[in-house]
Amino acid sequence: MIVMKFGGTSVESASAIERVAEIVKENVPCRPIVVVSAMRKTTNALLAMGRDAAEGKREAALDEMEALKNFHRREMYPVISPNDRYELNRILDEHFNELSDILKGLAALGELTPRSSDAIASFGERISSTIFAMALRARGIPGVHLDSRKLIVTDERFTQASPLYGQTFSRLAGAISSLDKHDVPVLGGFIAATENGVTSTLGRGGSDFTASIVGAAVDATEIQIWTDVDGMLTSDPSLVPDAHRVKTLSFAEASELAYFGARVLHPSTVLPAMRKGIPVRILNSRRPESPGTLIVAEPVPCSNILKCVAFKRQITVVNVHSTHMLMAHGFLHRIFEIFDRFETPVDMLATSEVSVSLTIDNPARLDAICDELRPFSQVSVENDQAIVCVVGENIRHTPGVAARVFGAIHDVNVRAISQGASLLNLSFVVAAADLPRAVRALHKEFFTELDPMVFD
Ligand code: ASP
Ligand code: MG
């Protein structure tokens, strides 16, 4: 069995759905299990109408919902069999009636809780997966829709829920083994439910994670993430137009990169696959003939030191300076406890005896955090920063990598350097204005000659 996950752009329109249904058809001999995202922009549209409803803009929310329904009907009509049109309308009515009840309820309550946010966001995948199964049947493939909310069990951290693996694996394995072996199961990504059956989601971009969970549950031979790019590249082509495809990566390298290339692969995806040693392949649904990027346990020998120069824009650096830190214990704990309480993840960290620099990518609650840090430290905040991260298993085996990295960007002001314990990445902060120059210089330094087994 293989898992084939199709992202929002791969099912964004009638023609995209048709293309993807053909890809599934060609893979029927591999016994695919299909995981689909909501149609592109649907989740954003749903969450926007939820917010509007909660802010009292009831009519606006209901209008947006009508537009979304029309969009779904228009794009889905052509992909199903004419005999199923009545059924399609029934399914759309049923889902959108339920959604409109929730929106009206929110308008009355005036509050969008994480729990209702998940209820609203779930409609995108609930609808796309139901209709995709119909689209497969229209092509003679026995697509069977399975409701992920009955199979993937999570904790109650709505909008960011984590799977309870024991129950999830046994439900998934049970449901899939009870199907006929010719059936092609279709599940919505991203959506799940708590033990009490309340709808939850795995976080934005979580359909990749669903695919990996499903693959691990059934011991799939491969987990395919079909997207709209040719796989992982040596850098982002928006800054490095001559970036090359990386044919193969290790799980460890992919986990480091997922944070930076979140658009290509959701960071949680690697773990379930890695635990079971299931290869993950990133493929392009617009160019199915391209071999994509294969992520495996054992890194393939590579004569280049790096696999990728990744980066993340719009980073905020927080510098916490305190002479209390000198020889004191518990200082870092005190700082992290505050970030934790305000649910703000810290990504990168560099410390000296009297100061800590850390980076965050969501400054929404930074003012409150600074108010709590100030009584015992001096705090300064720098916006418009970026993290550059060079990744490669060979970093740990090669002396002098840092000298080459910083030599290549000797004219860029580098701050807050950090090397993870895995020793396969080196990250540092630069001003956003210096980012393009730094990334291009590093790419040139490390990718002028390429190992043909690993890059093309
Ligand atoms: N539809 C969800 C989102 O937009 C999940 C996904 O696409 O992976 O975040
Ligand atoms: Mg995605």
Image (cartoon, helix red, strand yellow):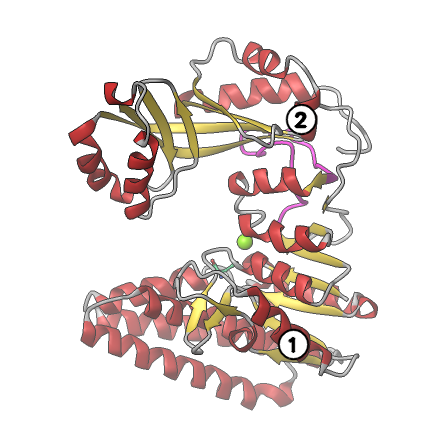
Q: Residue at x 43, y 36 (%)?
A: 347
Q: Nearer the viewer, residue 128 or 203?
A: 203
Q: Which residue is mark 1?
A: 135
**How far across and how far down the image is residue 299, in percent?**
75, 37
Q: Nearer the viewer, residue 193 or 124?
A: 193
**How far across and how far down the image is residue 51, in percent?**
28, 63
> Which residues are drawn in magenta?
228-248
Count of all numbered marks drawn on residues in the image:
2
Q: Residue at x 28, y 44 (%)?
A: 364
Quadrant position of residue 238 = top right
Which circle, 1 or 2, is nearer the viewer? 2
Classify mark 2: helix, strand or loop. loop
The quadrant of the rendering that contains the N terminus is bottom right
Q: Nearer the viewer, residue 390 or 238?
A: 390
The quadrant of the rendering that contains the C terminus is top right
Q: Which residue is mark 2?
A: 306
- Dominant SS of magenta comes to loop
Q: Is residue 233 magenta?
A: yes
Classify mark 1: helix, strand or loop. helix
Looking at the rendered structure, the kind of residue marked 1 is Ala
**Label 1, ligand 1: CB separation under 8 Å:** no
Q: Is residue 428 magenta?
A: no
Q: Nearer the viewer, residue 148 or 44?
A: 148
